[in-house]
Image (cartoon, helix red, strand yellow):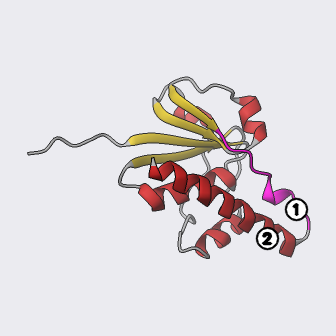
Amino acid sequence: MAASVAKERVLFLCVHNSARSQMAEGLLRHAAGERFDVFSAGFEAGSVRPEAIEVMREVGIDIADQKNKTVEAFAGQPFDLVVTTCDEAKEACPLFPGAKWMLHWSFPDPAAIGAPDERLKAFRAVRDGLREKVWELAAT
């Protein structure tokens, strides 16, 4: 019988764990969930933004059941890779104890856009940028 290979553990971090990190989690799980155990967290409690759920459904990925989590939920856990998805998260967490590798992906907060139609465009742009980065990561 072949020995099973442990999945690499990846954690995406953002301030609120409401959009960017949630979308990245869904994208990597969809692209390579057989190779990665994927998680996301934030530094402040929030909820998954409805716009994030909507734009992910547009590309066939359902993140509606993903839950908001804070970094405390992962304290002391080992990760192969921790990725900050916004500049605020990188400043708050330049190093994550237990991470073998850290990456930083700088994406603007799409929720900061005022008008609903423009905000949805911003969510799509962030989703598409995250998708490019996630595909690169999944290809490694």
Q: Position of residue 96 (x, y in %)?
A: 59, 27
Foreground mark, 1 or 2?
2
Tell me the chief SS of the magenta region: loop
Kind of element beneath mark 1? loop
Helix or strand or loop: what does disc 2 sit on? helix
Which sits in the foreground, 80 or 41? 80
Q: Which mark is residue 113?
A: 1
Spot occupied by residue 134 in the image (x, y as percentages of width and height): 55, 53
Residue, disc 2: 121
Q: Quadrant of residue 6?
A: top left
Indicate the amino acid at tag 1.
Ile
Dot 1 or dot 2: first in sequence order is 1
Q: CA distance from mark 1 to mark 2?
A: 9 Å
Pointer 1 with pointer 2, Cβ within 8 A? yes
Q: Nearer the viewer, residue 58 or 116?
A: 58
Q: Is residue 73 magenta?
A: no
Mark 1 surroundings: few (<14), some (14-19) or many (≥20) residues within 10 A: some
Q: Which residues are magenta?
A: 104-114
Residue drawn 66% across and 64% down?
A: 128
